[in-house]
């Protein structure tokens, strides 16, 4: 077993723990649905974050084919990207503390459910934006992808889309932004695999 295998196992452990905790948060929110209504955007973003966790893992398993020798800095960048997604996992599902801080009553409206989602959800999505921006820079640094390489520009475009989404307050903008991000994610998860970088 080489050092790359150890680091990949650590990445796998981090991702598994983050997804387990996020799904636990989602189950808790479902059980408390009589006390706190859950906006439908929450499970959509949970699925999107899981999809990008999967893409990160799949990409990490392919990395040894592209680069045989790894430095501590390069491993640190990989772990850093993983941790950013882990933080997004923990922030996306709102909890009871959010309800109390926003002063929401037990039987609240769809509007207050959306505001509760935005309260921490915007920070989870900010983590995703940071993840894509860092991935854009890492692709330039590690894989010598050009600034305007289509495989790399996708990361930057996703980061910009998420920043625009964070700045919006209207539910309709969030719905549109989520739909666009979901569509771009389907394309991105296929295109952003490291196996495509060598082509």
Image (cartoon, rainbow, N blue to C red):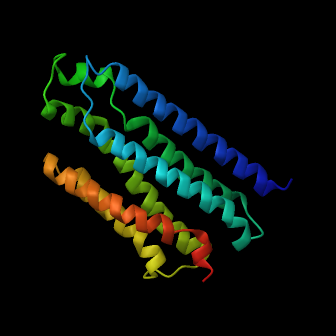
Q: Where is residue 113 in the image (x, y as percent from the top left)?
A: 20, 31
Q: Measuring 15% from the left and 23% from the top, which residue is drawn there?
A: 108
Vertical side of 75 occupied by 197: above or below: below
In the rendered image, residue 2, in percent from the top left (x then y), is placed at 84, 56
Q: Is residue 171 visible?
A: yes
Q: Please identify the quadrant where the C terminus is shown.
A: bottom right
Query: Looking at the image, which residue is at 53% across and 74% down?
Result: 140
Apparent side of residue 30 relative to residue 5 in the rendered image (left or right): left
The residue nearer to you, when weighing 104 against 107, is: 107
Provide residue 82's location: percent of width, then percent of height: 56, 49
Q: In this view, does 122 lie to the left or right of 155?
A: left
- Residue 169 in sight here: no
Residue at the location (47% across, 68% down)? 136
Identify the residue at the far right of this view: 1
Residue at the spot 69% in from the left edge and 45% down from the top edge = 10
Q: Where is residue 77 in the image (x, y as percent from the top left)?
A: 60, 57
The answer to whether 104 is drawn above or below residue 81 in the figure is above
Q: Which of 79 and 107 is in front in this view?
A: 107
Tell me where residue 68 sits by quadrant.
bottom right
Task: Name the image quarter holding residue 91.
Answer: top left
Residue 189 versus residue 109 in the image, above or below: below
* Total numbered labels placed on residues in the image: 0
Tell which of 130 and 182 is nearer to you.
182
């Amino acid at each position: 077993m080489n050092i790359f295998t150890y680091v990949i196992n650590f990445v796998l452990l981090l991702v598994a723990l983050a997804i387990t905790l996020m799904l636990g948060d989602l189950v808790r929110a479902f059980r408390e649905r009589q006390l706190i209504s859950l906006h439908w955007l929450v499970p959509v973003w949970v699925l999107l974050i899981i999809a990008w966790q999967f893409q990160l893992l799949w990409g990490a398993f392919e990395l040894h084919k592209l680069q045989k020798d790894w430095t501590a800095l390069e491993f640190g960048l990989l772990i850093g990207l993983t941790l950013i997604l882990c933080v997004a996992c923990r922030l996306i599902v709102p909890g009871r503390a959010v309800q109390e801080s926003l002063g929401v009553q037990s039987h609240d409206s769809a509007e207050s459910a959306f505001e509760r989602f935005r309260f921490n959800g915007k920070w989870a999505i900010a983590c995703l934006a940071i993840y894509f921006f860092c991935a854009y820079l890492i692709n330039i640094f590690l894989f010598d992808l050009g600034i305007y390489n289509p495989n790399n520009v996708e990361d930057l475009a996703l980061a910009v889309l998420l920043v625009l989404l964070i700045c919006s307050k209207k539910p309709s903008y969030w719905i549109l932004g989520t739909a666009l991000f979901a569509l771009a994610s389907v394309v991105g998860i296929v295109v952003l695999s490291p196996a495509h970088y060598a082509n």
